Amino acid sequence: MKEPLRDVRSYRLPEEVVVPLLNGLPEVAVQTIAAITMEVPAYAEAFAGELGHKIERAVQAALGTFFKLVSRPGGDPGTPLQAALDGAYALGRGEARSGRSLDALLAAYRVGARVSWRELAAISVGTGQPAAIIADFAELVFAYIDELSAASVAGHADELAASGRIRLRHLQELAQMLVAGEPPHVVQAAAEQAEWTPPQTLTAIILPERAARWVIDLLDPRTLHLVDAVPELPGMTVLLVPDPQGTSRPLLFRLLTGHSATIGPARPWMEAKSSVDRVIRVHELCRPGGGGVVDTEDHLASVVVTADPSALADLRARALAPLAGERGASGAKLVETLRSWLLHHGRREDVAADLFVHPQTVRYRMARLRELYGERLKDPEWVLALTIALAVPEP
């Protein structure tokens, strides 16, 4: 592997070679910037006006540093070289902040290397330098520009990594604010700081962290990812997915097939907390497992009925008071039968099929229930209370 830094430090150009090259640097810089502007569209507007003149001076300074290195061996060549590398590194970071891609930066270096060498070679040939000196000079020039290019690439990558980490933190803060139900003006400011374009709606999904890492790459890139959003559900992650409604909602279900996930309702993005609250509630009720995908829309009645657990317990105790004297398995079977009877509107065959018993067994059990409840099984208020009390099986 070639070691260009060692070559640059050890090589010495005669003064009669260096002086014409130094004198020609201003024009070399002008030609280099003109070529980059023409051949690399990303820089056409960027190099216009005063910025273009600054870049010309930077090109002159970079090549001037090179000539200092190859014309004064024996001193401390690392200092001017390090300064040039630091400048190239800073250039790379600045280009990343400006939003220009690494491809554009490398293209600019390629064009700059070609044009600057063409102009420098023309000066050397014009002053009658031997072919051997020009060949050595070419190798040193390209090695030096390769070093500058590598430093700029490193700066570009470091800036993207740093800005990516910062943006990720801002996105997580935005997700936390949405889940916490912060005021709209606070959330809007957080979205702007995170450079996040709000969708019309967000849908909450809760699923294991290991599944979220796989699924998130298949979703809208604006999807917000909130790890450990629910302390009482360790290892679970909440995703806030933009606009998975209409035709896109079935696609979301297909993507989640094979994972244990619960999908909430779509809500205006500022009201994402509503979807998060719903999805957590249904997840706690259903505890999906074995790769099942649960849609909260299929469990609205359970959500409503269990909204106030204390009130439900009181209602259940009052509604089932006539069964207080029935003990053990006998009482449990009567409760099970009464629940099925209510849900199937008294259709004996359907109740028998639901409970996997003979219709005659249903007849016997209902006779006992009528003994215990009497006319109350015909009272709409009591039927309503019993239906609500038994709508969700007791855990």
Image (cartoon, grey):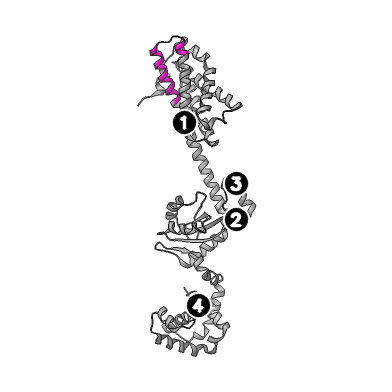
Q: Can residue 197 be seen in this view?
A: yes
- Range of magenta residues: 123-145
Q: Report the quarter where the N terminus lies.
A: top left
**Which residue is most to the left?**
1
| Residue type, mark 2 in image | Met
Residue at the spot x=56%, y=71% of the render?
308
Q: Could you tell me the amino acid type at mark 4?
A: Leu
Q: Spatial distance from mark 1 to mark 4, Cα to Cα?
A: 70 Å
Answer whether residue 232 is visible to the viewer in this image.
Answer: no
Q: Name the residue under label 2.
A: 270
Q: From mark 4 to mark 2, how far is it between C-alphas? A: 36 Å
- Image coordinates of residue 113 in percent, x first then y, are 46, 24
Question: How busy is the neighbourhood of tag 3: few (under 14 within 10 Å), some, or many (20 plus)?
Answer: few
Q: Verify CB contact (< 8 Å) between mark 3 and mark 2.
A: no
Question: Looking at the picture, how far across and down is residue 37, in whole percent?
Answer: 53, 27
Circle 1 is placed at which residue position?
106
| Residue at x 57%, y 83% (from the top left corner) | 380
**293 to 327, vertically: above or below:** above
Please name which of the two marks, 4 or 2, marks the residue nearer to the observer.
Answer: 2
Magenta region's main secondary structure? Answer: helix
Give the percent coordinates (x, y) of residue 195.
57, 45
Callout 3 secondary element:
helix
**Separation of marks 1 and 2 at Cα, in angstroms:** 42 Å
User: Pointers 1 and 4 in contact (CB under 8 A)?
Assistant: no
Please, what secondary structure does the residue beneath circle 4 have?
Answer: helix
Q: Earlier in the sequence, mark 4 or mark 2?
A: 2
Q: What residue type is labelled 1?
A: Leu
Q: In the rendered image of this protein, does residue 193 appear above or below residue 364?
A: above
Query: Looking at the rendering, which quadrant does residue 8 occupy?
Result: top left
Residue that badge 3 annotates: 192
- In primary-sequence order, the first of circles 3 and 2 is 3
Residue picked out by circle 4: 390
